[in-house]
Image (spheres, rainbow, N blue to C red):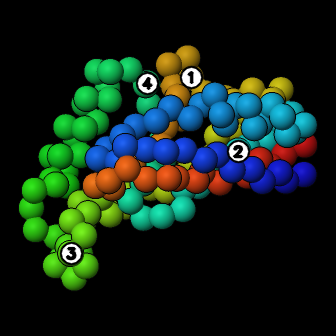
Amino acid sequence: MIVTENISLSTGGNGDIIDITPEVAGKVDGSGIKNGSVNLFVPGSTAGLTTVEYEPGLVADLAELWQRLAPQDITYQHDKRWGDGNGHAHVRASLLGTSLVVPFTSAGLALGTWQQIVLVDFDNRPRSRQVVIQIVGE
């Protein structure tokens, strides 16, 4: 069986990290599917998905990592073409990726004790985001 759901969120942009684990777990639990995998996808090219230990120290560490890997204050060809100042956001999202797969058993996500599912919005402004959730299993 396959069940497709969505999560809607508002973000602050600028590297905003949002824990979506409770929403994903609720969708899996409500699907009636007991064993399988949940496929997550964020449409757009300036946000990504991953798992982390969602705590203030790691959130700060990630912000520093992104600034080292794809600094916001350098010239990007994308910005020259479009003038929207979010070239760094596109590069960062490309590095992180826009999808994630998490297995589940007995309708419970197979995450580690300190592991949460997060959306990271790299854009340079607040956004309304959707996460497409496709639950596959039996």
Where residue 19 appears, x then y in whole percent? 50, 32
100 vs 5, left or right, is left
Disc nearer the start of the sequence (2/4): 2
Residue 130 got which mark?
Answer: none
How far apart are labels 1 and 4 at the CA level? Answer: 9 Å
The answer to whether the residues at label 2 and label 4 have Cβ atoms under 8 Å apart is no
How far apart are labels 2 and 4 at the CA level? Answer: 19 Å
Q: Which residue is mark 3?
A: 83
Q: Nearer the viewer, residue 35 or 94?
A: 94
Q: Is residue 65 above or below residue 132?
A: above
- Tell me what residue is drawn at x 46 percent, y 35 percent: 18
Q: Disc 3 marks which amino acid?
A: Gly
Q: Specify whether residue 51 is in view.
A: no
Where residue 39 appears, x then y in whole percent? 67, 50
Instruction: Kindly indicate the quadrant of the structure image that contains residue 37.
Output: top right
Q: Dot 1 surroundings within 10 Å: few (below 14), some, or many (20 or more)?
A: few
Q: Give the foreground label among 1 and 3.
A: 3
Q: Dot 3 surroundings within 10 Å: few (below 14), some, or many (20 or more)?
A: few
How far apart are labels 3 and 2 at the CA level? Answer: 37 Å
81 vs 41, left or right, is left
Disc nearer the start of the sequence (1/2): 2
Disc nearer the start of the sequence (1/4): 4
2 vs 81, left or right, is right
- Tell me what residue is drawn at x 10 percent, y 68 percent: 75
Q: Residue furthest left?
A: 74
Q: Disc 2 marks which amino acid?
A: Val
Q: Which residue is mark 1?
A: 112
Disc nearer the start of the sequence (3/2): 2
Q: Quadrant of the C terminus?
A: top right
Q: Which residue is mark 4?
A: 53
Residue 38 got which mark?
Answer: 2
Q: Nearer the viewer, residue 65 or 75?
A: 75
